[in-house]
Amino acid sequence: MKKDLETLQQRLGYQFNDTSLLETALRHRSATGENNERLEFLGDAVLGQVMAEELYRRHPKAREGELSRMRSSLVNGERIALLAKRLALSDYLLLGAGEQKSGGQHRISILADAFEAVIGAIYLDAGMDVSRDCVLRWYGESIESLSEITPVKDAKSVLQEWLQAHKRPLPTYEASVSGEAHAQTFHVTCSVDGLSHKTEGISTSRRKAEQIAAQNFLDLIDEK
């Protein structure tokens, strides 16, 4: 096991001071001994913080909803299980006989939990700065190419998600039209019950006018 752990630490790019932390991080609850559930809990929190800080730094103009979506896409089970596979964690997992026989070492949930547990183990062994360096190195270009995997949502969708997250009613859009049939101008107002804001959007299409009104509403929220 010590030889195996040495090889794994080379893959991780981190040498543990206390290798028992790494052993625990790799031990599934189906195996005997202290399992990795507590370390997984800790690693999940560390991973979330690292990604939140990194996305906040890289995307200074992104809104809360956009940052949340980007973070979710980076820390979902399938993505971190893929990273676990790249690090070959499946070769080092300690599983009970039943899990081993059923191929548990390749199960997404088990790999994802082990990945987070390893982060938790590094955090306990060396602290936040080292944990951050490891996480960002493992993710590599995945963060850089985030715009390719995260769709950009329109202002109306972002506003609706913000309101739902803050337990507010959905917005109301009221429209009026001016001008001749071949050259109409749409005036749309956006309001939300319980909030004093009321914004306007003007465009040659109702859809665009609603988007402008929603964006103006979001701008007011950001200023609060």
Image (tube, grey):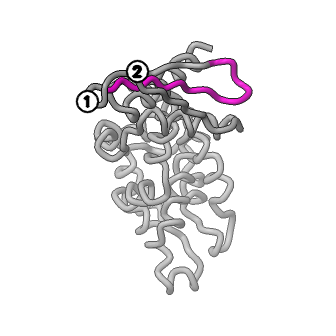
Q: Position of residue 198 (x, y in %)?
A: 60, 19
Residue identified by numbered label 2: 202
Q: Report crowding for label 1: few under 14, some 14 to 19, many 20 or more residues within 10 A (C-alpha).
A: few
Residue found at the far front of this picture = 180
Name the residue type under label 2. Answer: Ile
Please identify the quadrant where the C terminus is shown.
top right
Magenta span of residues: 184-197
Q: Nearer the viewer, residue 100 or 67?
A: 67
Q: Residue 151: give its label.
A: none
**Residue at image location 57% in from the left, 13% down from the top:** 223
Residue 10 lies within the magenta run: no
Residue name at image x 31 percent, y 25 percent: 180
Residue 56, given in percent of the width and then of the height, sits at: 47, 26
Q: Is residue 218 left or right of residue 88?
A: right
The answer to whether residue 96 of the structure is visible from this angle is yes
For marks 1 and 2 on the same chain, the one whose residue lies earlier in the sequence:
1
Based on the displayed image, in which of its 4 quarters is residue 96 positioned? bottom right
